[in-house]
């Protein structure tokens, strides 16, 4: 058995990330059987365990994940406390996030995905979101760095750390918008109530970026980007083939300014994307998975050993969008 630090029933093999609230470890069970996969264990930083509001924010992700059972959402394998420190355990994923896939191994412009791979990715994510929405969970941070693709091309939505969970008390401390500003919805920017249609807006923004190589509203700076989002005026749009008119119309509807004008159901979005895949001759995503897997294997090894990371652990620069295109003014605690 590999050496490591003992933490309850687990051995912490390597600290993969640390941030303002939590730390993530590559881990394994102490009683691990041969061939049993490694795990990702995330725990609240010990010095923060006495802060009830931070602990509540951490445990919100646990409750969100308990409610969701879908192949595109990593399962919660365990959760609890050890020595007064709350933790969660999920599968360790080897692969890359969508931001890494789009960047590839070079330092130049992002390289778009094919239409087939994008629709497959979108259908999987929309399916996971539909299950979350039916369970009363709004992710509200759908963005490229929160989408994982493993070495087989499987797609996962991660990081429910700032999700809104129906029936769960919300914290109130702090100011500011929750979520990444380049993928925020008009209602998030305005501080208005949100629901599942907020996630649809963000998902459409991600899919347009996957097709076009740039987020649809990304402008010269944060202020101009937020202004475009508030007006629902995208700067760029991919040219889709005629047979995908329904897909094009649905993406445009998902990005409408008023939530009431967006699709009435996340399941409707899944159905449209699936019909698009059928039009392209890849209804089961076989071609799409091969492309995604190949792109994942092309990510440099230094960033290819990927572990589930919450937003506060990824080292995102929240003040300089030139450094981090996913950056946001995310407040550490509370919500609108």
Image (spheres, helix red, strand yellow):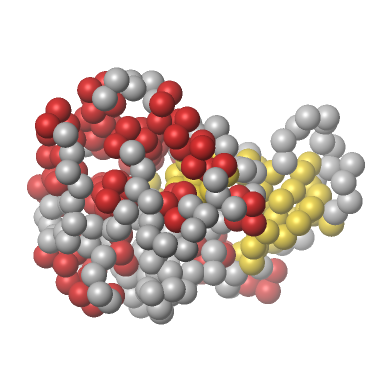
Q: Is residue 18 visible in the rendered structure shown here?
A: yes
> x%, y% of residue 260?
11, 48
* Callout count: 0
In the image, taking residue 98 as reference, residue 247 lies left or right, namely: left
* Residue at the (84%, 57%) spot, across then down: 5
Q: Is residue 281 above or below residue 71?
A: above
Q: Is residue 271 visible in the rendered structure shown here?
A: no
Q: Nearer the viewer, residue 202 or 49?
A: 202
> x%, y% of residue 62?
54, 49
Residue 124: name its quadrant: top left
> x%, y% of residue 176?
34, 75
> x%, y% of residue 264?
16, 39
* Residue at the (45%, 56%) spot, across then down: 103
* Residue at the (45%, 44%) spot, across then down: 157
In the image, taking residue 197 as reference, residue 97 lies left or right, namely: right
Q: Nearer the viewer, residue 52 or 223?
A: 223
Q: Quadrant of the C terminus?
A: bottom left
Q: Quadrant of the N terminus?
A: top right
* Residue at the (14%, 46%) spot, across then down: 252
């Amino acid at each position: 058995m590999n050496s490591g630090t003992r933490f309850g029933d687990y051995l912490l093999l390597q600290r993969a990330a640390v941030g303002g609230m939590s730390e993530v470890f590559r881990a394994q069970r102490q009683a691990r059987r041969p061939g049993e996969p490694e795990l990702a264990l995330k725990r609240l930083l010990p010095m923060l365990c006495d802060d009830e509001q931070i602990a509540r924010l951490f445990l919100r992700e646990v409750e969100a994940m308990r409610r969701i059972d879908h192949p595109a959402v990593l399962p919660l394998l365990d959760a609890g406390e050890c020595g007064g420190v709350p933790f969660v355990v999920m599968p360790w994923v080897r692969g890359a996030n969508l931001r890494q896939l789009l960047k590839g191994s070079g330092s130049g412009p992002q390289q778009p995905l094919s239409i087939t791979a994008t629709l497959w990715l979108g259908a999987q994510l929309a399916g996971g979101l539909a299950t979350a929405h039916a369970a009363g969970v709004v992710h509200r941070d759908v963005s490229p760095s929160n989408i994982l693709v493993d070495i087989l091309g499987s797609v996962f939505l991660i990081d429910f750390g700032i999700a809104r969970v129906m029936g769960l008390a919300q914290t109130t401390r702090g100011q500011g918008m929750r979520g990444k500003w380049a993928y925020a919805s008009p209602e998030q920017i305005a501080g208005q109530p949100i629901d599942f249609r907020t996630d649809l807006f963000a998902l459409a923004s991600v899919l347009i970026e996957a097709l076009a190589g740039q987020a649809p509203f990304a402008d010269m700076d944060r202020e101009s980007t937020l202004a475009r989002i508030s007006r629902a005026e995208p700067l760029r749009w991919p040219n889709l083939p005629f047979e995908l008119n329904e897909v094009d119309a649905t993406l445009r509807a998902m990005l409408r300014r008023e939530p009431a004008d967006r699709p009435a159901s996340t399941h409707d979005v899944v159905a449209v994307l699936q019909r698009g895949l059928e039009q392209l001759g890849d209804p089961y995503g076989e071609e799409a998975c091969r492309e995604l897997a190949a792109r994942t294997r092309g990510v440099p090894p230094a960033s290819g050993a990927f572990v589930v990371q919450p937003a506060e652990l990824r080292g995102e620069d929240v003040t300089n969008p030139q450094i981090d295109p996913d950056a946001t003014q995310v407040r550490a605690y509370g919500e609108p």
